[in-house]
Every structure is written in C-alpha cells, then in structure tokens.
Amino acid sequence: MIAPSKYDLILVGTGFASTFFLKKFLEKPSNASKKVLVLERGVFYPHQDRLNTMRGQEPDYKKLLTKQEDTFFNTNKKKPWVFDVNFGGSSNCWWGCTPRLMPSDFKMKTLYGVANDWPLTYEELESYYCETEEIMAISGPEATPYPMSKKYPLPSHILGTVDKAFQKKYGDKMYISQPTARASRPTGNRNACCSSYSCNVCPVNAKFTIENTLIDVYKDPRVELRYNSQVLRLRLENDVAKAVQVKSEGKTYEVEGELIGLGANTIFNAHILLNSGDTSPLLGKGLTEQVGVFAHVFLDGMMNVGASSSLSANGYMLYEGAFRKDYGSCLIEHHNLPLVRNERGKWRNIARLKFVFEDLPDNSNSVKLSENEEKPTVDYKGHTAYADRAFENIKKEVSNLLSCLPVEKIVMDDYYQDTEFHSLSSVRMSKDPKDGVVDDKMLHHKYRNLLVMGGSAFTTASAANPSLTISALSLRSADKLFS
Ligand SMILES: Cc1cc2nc3c(=O)[nH]c(=O)nc-3n(C[C@H](O)[C@H](O)[C@H](O)COP(=O)(O)OP(=O)(O)OC[C@H]3O[C@@H](n4cnc5c(N)ncnc54)[C@H](O)[C@@H]3O)c2cc1C
Ligand code: SF4
C-alpha cells in the first residue's frame, strides 16, 4: 500500500492523551473514511518483555531502546522527570491512581484569587470522566467528595484497619477507598489486583494500560502507526499547522495533515512547538508538578492489615477550604506497602501516609530549546512557596489529623520526594489567549487545526493525579470537534 502524502489526522505519541482522542475520533460517523497517521518515537515494548526484563531476561532489542533520561537536558539534577517513551507512553509504568479533580480545582481564580480558572468547568467534563472510568474499568467507592452521575464500574478495593479508623472519624466522603485503574475484579484482559506494590510493571497485568485495553484502536484500518518516528517540529504557515517534520532512522521527512494533534507529554509538546517557531508568550512556561512528603505512623496495639490494593485510600480532609488563597490543597494517600517494624509483637503496627500538595504554575520553571534540535532543556528551579506553606500547615495539623489512630509516634519526612511523576502545565489552557496557549478543547489559540493534549494543558496543578483528567479531556475534545 502506498502511504498517502496527506492525512486527515496526524497524532504524535501513543499515550493517554493521543489514544483517548483517537478512540473517540474513530467512533464518530463523520470520520468513517478518514486516514490517520500516528507517529511514535519509541517502539512496542510489550508488558511480557517488561516483566521478563524485571526477571533479568532482557529482550535483545532492549539495549537499543531510547533511554528517557537521554531525551532531554536537565538543568536541575535533583529534580528527575520520569516517563516512558514507547508505545502506550507512561501508561506502561503508571501506578493507576485515578481520583477526579474537584469542581473547585477548575476555579482557582474565582474561588481563591490565585492562578487562573480553567476554561471549562467540572460539570462540562463530568460525562467524559464517566466514560473514561468505564474504559479504564475503574474500581471505586459508592460515596465520593466530588459529584458523580454514574457509579464506578468496578467495586471499590477493600479498606484496611487503619483506613477504617480514618473513615469512622471523617466519614465515607472525606476518606475513600482510592479510585483506581488497578482492577478489584478480573476485567477485560486484566486480572484482579493482589496488592503486591510493584505497579510500575504489574506482575499480574491488573492495572489499565493502553496495551491491555486500547491497543485495538491502532489496528483500525484507517490508522497507520509508525514506530521510531520522532516528530521534531511542525511547519506553521500563517495561522495553519501544515505538516510535521519527522526523524526516523537517521532520515528526516515531512508529512502533511488536515488536523494535527500533539500527545507527546508535557515536555515534548512544548519542545515541538518551540522548535516550530510558535511565539505564544506563555509557551513552555509554568512547568509544574505537585510535591509529596511521606509520614510513617507507628501504631500502638493496632495492626495495619486487610487492604486489597497498593494505595488503599485517599483522604480529602485538607483538600478544600478558604486556605487555598494562601497555600495548596493536600491529598492524602495511604501507601499500603508491606512495611515491617523490627520489634517483637509490633511488626505490622505501622502505616505509611503520603501528603501530596498542590502547586501553582510559576513562569520561571520552563521547557526551553537547546542547541540540539532533538532535545529540550528542562529548567525547573523549584516549586513555589504556595506548596511549602501547605507542608508547614501539615506539620501543625498532623497530630490532630491522626487522632483517630492509636498513635505511638509519627515520623514525618522533612524533605519532599524528588518527583510525583506528574509533569504539568507547559502549554496551558485558558479562555483568553493572553493567559495560555490552548483553549478548552486544547486547540491552539492561533493555529486552529492544532491540538496540544495531555498534562501540558492543565491550567493549574491540583493535588489529584492527572491521567484520568488527561484522558477525559481528550475524549471531550474529539467529541466536540467531530459529529
Ligand atoms: C512511575 C509513574 C507513575 C505514575 N503514576 C500515576 C498515577 O498513579 N496516576 C496518574 O494519574 N498518573 C500517574 N503518572 C503520570 C502519567 O503517567 C502521565 O500523566 C501520563 O502518562 C501522561 O499522558 P500523556 O499521553 O500526555 O503522555 P505519555 O504517557 O508520556 O505519552 C507520550 C507519548 O508520546 C511519545 N513521544 C514523545 N515525544 C515524541 C515525539 N517527539 N515524537 C513522537 N512521539 C513522541 C512517547 O513515546 C509516548 O508514547 C505516573 C507516571 C510515572 C512515570
Ligand atoms: S498492587 Fe500488585 S497486582 Fe495491584 S496493580 Fe500493583 S502490582 Fe499489580
């Protein structure tokens, strides 16, 4: 078959952002005879080979794979940015935590006078959250702090003893079994989660990945998928994105598209646009991620047992309130890893909590061009005082917060984890072009046939994990653009 010289849709990347868009695009009757090209810089590195690698049986091609740390220059060696550059993107290595954002997260300016409002509301995204949860077969509770028009498709994971004590004090809306793509029951091609806490490569294939659930969208006869194809830049003419320039096996070529969608992640979406000469003032600026701190709770006479997944619960006790004028919200995670105390009779009397703090985009943190056209520079100076103040507040609140547990002592880290694995906000959404680069459908404010999808579009970095929202935004975008 001779490849067309022009495609109706060109997508860059095969992670959450591109795949959920493509799924919805292919379902639309108006796209029945469209031709789609998908360009993926990596290869198909299947789950089974990833498992074999963990067991020390590396497939031959493994040494040829692009190492993610070689894909960009990092000015801040203390701050890693972690992602997977192969088919399925970081769905291969994510942990599967899928809380929704709260309605307030979309209205930071209106409610708290900080940062900016998202150009869409929670209510406008709600039905797409439901659809994403159905596709990912999310396990979640009956009661949630955010409104839901449909129940989670799979029953929630079982709470442990510590979780039950929290829930008794704070109620079943404030402290919930974590909504998760780690299946509580066998579903589709996935097995039930058995709480082994090695979710980056799940040994029993329990968590949602693009490979185990959505690979078929790439087998559609309308779709051509090319591996080893790194998109370097776009050809922008007047107000139109005409073509993508691709580097593959040492050669560079160009291919034209009617609609072009970038789903290359927060760092590379910004880089491709910068390489293309896009002069949007906020492009690349505002790179953000939440920050997190662990606390270990030593329990007096209580064993921490019984939970059925690796992160068993989320606490919303410090998520909402007028304090967000001054400091970030906090999402509490209970990390249900098999911790053992080396003390007779107390070996399971310990819990590990993580406090994840919201941060606000700061324009001095950015993705920039480097001298190498294939590699961006990531210049992240650090998180803001908004997150630091949230941490200071937790230090004051923690004893009171944990008063429902028989606490022997609390040992709280005085340092942040070096990453939360969520890069966000380098190509922000906004209503007004002066406040961002893309609109509510993630269409570029200037180049109206160019989509820039994924966490890069997040207007702010709420404390909640982003990938459910990334996927829902992509479904919404395709739904709004095509009939
Ligand atoms: C260890 C880990 C744990 C995580 N856990 C969670 C979690 O529990 N919950 C949660 O919500 N989020 C989690 N995340 C974050 C989540 O993985 C990301 O938010 C999500 O993958 C972003 O989706 P994306 O499609 O925008 O980008 P990606 O998934 O990064 O996909 C980008 C795709 O684009 C391709 N690509 C990149 N550049 C180019 C180019 N120039 N040309 C062609 N192709 C290109 C890549 O190869 C890849 O296929 C985790 C991440 C990591 C690393
Ligand atoms: S806890 Fe274990 S079974 Fe569950 S998703 Fe993680 S690795 Fe898989």
Image: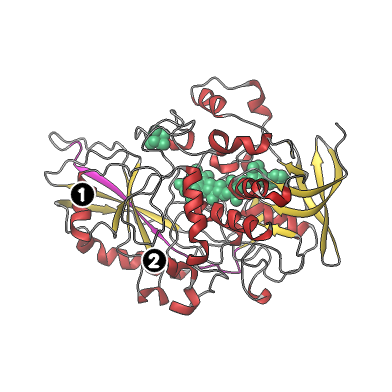
Does the magenta segment cover residue 141? no
Which numbered tag is attached to residue 164? 1
Measured from the top left, where is residue 187 in percent x and y?
Answer: 44, 34
Marks 1/2: CA distance? 23 Å
What kind of element bears circle 2?
Answer: loop
Tag in front: 1 or 2: 1
Point out the quarter of the image occupied by ligand 2.
Answer: top left
Q: Residue at x 63, y 74 (%)?
A: 435
Region in magenta: 347-365
- Relative horizontal placement of residue 153, taking residue 348 as reference (left or right): right
Q: Is residue 132 left or right of residue 37?
A: left
- Could you tell whether 366 is left or right of 175 in the image? right
Residue at image coords 74%, 42%: 39
Q: Quadrant of residue 15?
A: top right
Characterize the local packing of mark 2: few (<14), some (14-19) or many (20 or more) Cα atoms within 10 angstroms.
Answer: many
Tell me where residue 204 appears, x and y as whole percent.
Answer: 43, 28
Q: Secondary structure at mark 1?
A: helix
Instruction: Depth check: give the residue in front, 16 or 198.
Output: 16
Q: Residue 147 in the image: x percent, y percent?
A: 38, 62
Point out residue 127 in the picture as x, y percentages from the top left corner. 50, 58
Residue on which disc 2 sits: 329
| Rendered image quadrant of residue 412 | bottom left
Q: Residue at x 42, y 45 (%)?
A: 138
Upstream in the sequence, badge 1 or badge 2?
1
> Mark 2 is on which residue type?
Ser
- Residue 331 makes an appearance in the image: yes
